[in-house]
Amino acid sequence: MAGPQTVIADARRHRARYLEELKEFVRFPSISAEPARAPDLERCAGWLVRHLRSMGLTSARVIPTAGHPLVLATTRKVPGRRTLLVYGHYDVQPTDPLSEWWTPPFCPTVRAGALYGRGASDDKGQLFAHLKALESYLRAAGEMPVNLICLIEGEEEVGSPGLTRFLRAQGRRLGADAVVVSDMPMAGPGRPAITYAMRGALSLQLDVRGPARDLHSGLYGGAVHNPAQALAEIITGLHRPDGRVAVPGFYRDVRRWSARERAYMRRVGPNDGRLAANGKIRTAWGEPGFTLYERTTIRPALTVNGMAGGYQGPGAKAVIPARATAKLGLRLVPDQDPAGIERLIGRRIAALTPETVTASLRTEFAAEPVLVDRGAPAVRAAYAALERGFGTAPVFVRLGGTIPPVSTMQRELDAPIVLMGFALPDDGMHAPNERFHLDNFFRGIETVVWFLDALGSPAFSSRGPGPAARPGEPP
Amino acid sequence: MAGPQTVIADARRHRARYLEELKEFVRFPSISAEPARAPDLERCAGWLVRHLRSMGLTSARVIPTAGHPLVLATTRKVPGRRTLLVYGHYDVQPTDPLSEWWTPPFCPTVRAGALYGRGASDDKGQLFAHLKALESYLRAAGEMPVNLICLIEGEEEVGSPGLTRFLRAQGRRLGADAVVVSDMPMAGPGRPAITYAMRGALSLQLDVRGPARDLHSGLYGGAVHNPAQALAEIITGLHRPDGRVAVPGFYRDVRRWSARERAYMRRVGPNDGRLAANGKIRTAWGEPGFTLYERTTIRPALTVNGMAGGYQGPGAKAVIPARATAKLGLRLVPDQDPAGIERLIGRRIAALTPETVTASLRTEFAAEPVLVDRGAPAVRAAYAALERGFGTAPVFVRLGGTIPPVSTMQRELDAPIVLMGFALPDDGMHAPNERFHLDNFFRGIETVVWFLDALGSPAFSSRGPGPAARPGEPP
């Protein structure tokens, strides 16, 4: 079997074609949130299956779900070799506001060394780095150092319902020894990273109801508790003035991190100025005693994602609305349990609700926080691979956001997960002018080649102290 | 000249046609707040002019304004006769929430003796009672006992900017000796009323801005003061927990009323149970020490008419909105000055705004509170007319709402104003399923006939003690 250098030489020879194929992939307007796009997702899944087959993965097939289909492909299973599951998604975010795009979102265009298009980095481009590494491996080396499973979904941007059901039913049977996901940013340009923690999410809808119907605010103003005002009062009661969440018990299970861990975070993560600049935040805010990076990663948060009540058109309308609504988004950290937190929030809201109105709370979705075992063999392999692929040692970073299928895979596959992103923090995932820097695409392919090679090597066959235990890094 | 009985007989003969014509009028979706409806308002004004001309008011014409047009029509001016100005408006409130309507708002439908449709009572139906009384008078009597001016605007629901400018420039030249407005409810079914006081209004828009653009709530949740949350905090700070408005100086100029006046209000006005039942309010709320009727009439109020920020569609979106907005509606009483109150609110909001966000306040419109001279000849004529039209003596009531042009007309025309409504308190003005009871429509027409007759009679030629000075009623 030829070594990784041969495989990398093959990948380099095929860069131009690999880019053209990625453009083909990005051209599908596979927006999972828009029902009218369902046929485009279907077509995109079909294209992926044909593409995987043409690469030699003759097992590739579409797996229907109640929503958009899954794509599953496997290499021939060789006993004694580790089995790696590569996860990715072919669905993309909506494109609005469309007017802010420099080039049409589904007309992939190379500008200044980056491929622009919706999905270029989230997640078509990052997923494609894995597929193209696999293709070069199969061609140049004839076989793989690991057994490989590609599991690609079309509902990541809408909560992964089909994937969750599939994994619950069939997850263990896949026999994955490790999972790799590339769907997140690096620490910065030239700064490779392994994500070792992600916050969980809990999405709630709060409805406050007052009078049976909308009332004229002239005729009834002063005699009825306005549901919009009552909602404002409840929302206000969910925070203390200092920025802490004012829900009894909310912080009880929040894990305390060692001084060493926090020192590491300060060293590798963005400082307050950098984080505020990234978000164009004029004045920061939040829980005292923590940096902004800590507030958005190791501390939980409660945000109002949406709020609505009464008249919202131009001008004025003299109305006391019968109902007002808020969408509350929580980000949870280890060891907070979404179901337990939901109960605490419900209890707090009940306590804050005056008898003049009624409040009801509904859960939209929940995802558990994720922690990665930094000493797992696959993580050690990823560390070594990123070091070779990017020419510099990666850092371990925390992500404030949530990739819901990751906690699902952790639970249902019972395998260590490697979160190794190739995008940049300003690649515009979910925003207009999403892009993927070609340098990171090609380095990503080579990194995956090194990763597959390392995973197959006896040097990474057992849990070790790993890169995380290097001096100055958290245990 | 034939007497009022002949005119009334004519009006009764034409009831079916009058109702059909009112339906035509209600069919125009003349929502003044929605810019896209401007052509519908234009068409509605044109229809009114043609309608008035067909009734014999050949002078009827459209008067353009910077916004929606005015309609002006006059009868031939006979010297020595009093000149009455009939005010009304052809614009209507928005229809949302549309899903709560039993029948489409612009598809007028008779159910159980009432005409359902947006504008049926506010103000197309009530205005139409005047127009149809006028039509029957002209037809049956050949001429009018007074000189008549019909002034109908299309911007009452948006602050009457065009009418205000028109009255400032031309008001005195109209030479009105009295003004009549029917755009308010009676005291209840079979209980006619003359409104002798209305609250003023101040409509404000509050914008709160935070980060320069929408942020991902996973990546930034906990590090930035959410504008929707900050807005909720500001709104909360505008009231004390007991329901009083928490704006320093807000109550300073509020007039105190005599025990006699308050006793009269208790006797003729709705008690707490009635008012709560009218509004389908399960649990009342508000300033301690006052009945609900007092809270909605002689006490000022601050209500949230609308509140919006972030995502409001189905499901969830992980966003921290860059901006959140509230529409604040104040109802003011004698002797509160809208401009002064606006300054106090602005100061309070500035004090409540944390340095993490910026808040800006814009005035949409302002209208002064109104008090009517209960001894004026026209009011005495209205009293007599209501007594004949409804078969029972009217009561004097206060209205919590505001008809902004009334204070403008009081100021610019310098003529006594008669506020004589034909709608019912539960006719759903500004709400879904707005309606106008046909019995009140037809009694309204006959009342107006009696009113025109009385106005022309020498018995009501001078200010008298009037009905207001009857035993037990306020001076």
Image (cartoon, coloured by chain):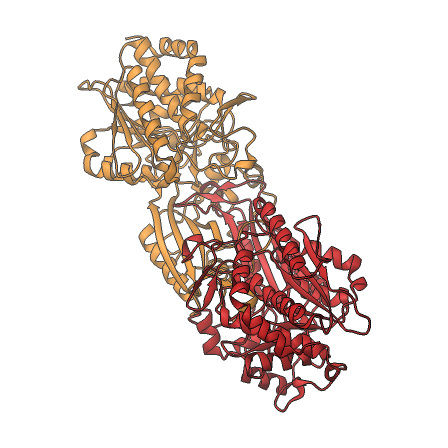
Chain colours: A red, B orange
Residue at x-position 33% and y-position 19%: B51
Residue A112's spot in the image, x, y percent?
41, 68
Rendered-image quadrant of the N terminus of chain A: bottom right
* Residue A2 seen: yes
Residue at x-position 40% and y-position 17%: B446
Residue B252's spot in the image, x, y percent?
38, 56
| Left or right for B225, reference B383 | right
| Left or right for B7, reference A54 | left
Looking at this view, is B110 or A443 the one in front?
Answer: A443
Residue B471's spot in the image, x, y percent?
43, 31
* Count of labels in the image: 0
Looking at this view, is A20 or B22 the one in front?
Answer: A20
Rendered-image quadrant of the C terminus of chain A: bottom right
Image vertical order of residue A39 relative to residue A368, above or below = above
Residue at x-position 31% and y-position 25%: B46
Query: Which of the 4 image quadrants contains residue A340?
Result: bottom right
| Left or right for B204, reference A449 | left
| Left or right for A196, reference B251 | right
Looking at this view, is A441 or B433 the one in front?
Answer: A441
Residue A402's spot in the image, x, y percent?
62, 65
Query: Which of the 4 image quadrants contains residue B404?
Result: top left
* Residue B125 seen: no
